[in-house]
Structures are given as C-alpha cells and as structure tokens.
Image (cartoon, helix red, strand yellow):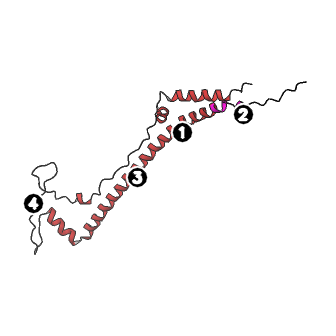
Amino acid sequence: MTTAAPTHPAPIALFDPGWLFLLAGLALLAATVLIPAADELAEVRLQRDRALMLEAHRVTRIDRYGEYLGALDREEPSLVVALAESQLNQIPQGRQPIIEQPQPLVGVPGAGASASVFAGLEPPPPTLPERVRIDSRLERWTTNDTTRPWLIAGGALCLLIGLLPRQS
C-alpha cells in the first residue's frame, strides 16, 4: 500500500492577485478625485493669501494717510513749515534756501522735482506670493479633461478585475 504524501500548495499559490488590481484601482480612482481637489484648494489659498496681503497694504496706506491728516489737524510746526516750503515755495524768516538741482521726474526729461507729499506717504508695493506648481505626469493626467475619464475608467476596470472571484 502506498500512501500519498499530503500536498501543500506553494505559498505563492495562496496569494490572490486580485488584491493587486483592487489596490491599483483604488489608488487610481483616489488620485483622480484628490489631486484636482488639492489643486483647486492650492489655487484658492493663493488667492486668499494675495487678498490678505493687499488688505494689509491698504490698511497700512490708510494708517499713514490718517497720521498725516492728524498732523495737519494738529498743525504740527515741522509739517506746516515743510508744506509751506514745498507747496507754496515760501521760506520762513531766518532760514536760507538750500539751492538744489531739481531732480527730473522719471520719463519726463527736463521736468522739475515733484512737490507732492503723497509719494512719501505711500507704503512700498506689496510682493504678492506666486504659485509653485508641482509638475508631474499624474497631476497633468488627473487635471486634464481628456485623460481624466480614461483614468476613471481604468481605475474602475482594475476594481472590477480585483473584485472578480478567484479561480480555483
């Protein structure tokens, strides 16, 4: 009598390859949903940051003009003398005029220096943040309207294959 030795399948035979398709399909579908949403979120955050910077710039500008108006209302002597010298070309008694060469305005040859006080009140222009895009093939495919449906279909097909029953 011969007894047959019990046969154990190889460990690789116990692994179901459907899991690989299932995981790949889930990853592909998740990428087609999450990457465009993250892209839109980054764009909205950039617009928010720009709006906050512009608001801060305008608040600084309003504060400077408010301080200037307050100094005018209080009739601060240094401001009144400076305005009389620059705007009305009047010099108080006991002072000597300083002879300066007028600086030409930018772009206007031969023009004199501006007597406007507003250039000194303006804050420096804000530097707005720029968007740094991460350029990858997956990002381009998931945000492109022609390739995105194909990725969804491919992910759904991988899910279908992964969910099929195992062959015995």
How crowded is the residue under tag 1: few (<14 C-alpha within 10 Å), some, or many (20+)? few
Residue 44 coordinates in the image, percent (x, y): 45, 44
In screen coordinates, is 6 left or right of 133?
A: right
Tag 1's secondary structure? helix
Q: What label does residue 108 carry, if any?
A: none
Verify CB contact (< 8 Å) between mark 3 and mark 1. no
Q: Which residue lies furthest to the front in this view?
A: 1
Please identify the dominant SS of the magenta region: loop
- Residue beneath disc 2: 11
Q: Which of marks 3 and 4 is nearer the N terminus?
A: 3
Residue 100 coordinates in the image, percent (x, y): 10, 63
Query: Which circle, 1 or 4, is nearer the viewer?
Result: 1
Tag 3's secondary structure? helix
Give the residues in magenta. Answer: 1-20
Question: In the image, is residue 12 above or below residue 69?
Answer: above
- Residue beneath disc 1: 34
Q: Which residue is drawn at 21% across and 71% down?
A: 78
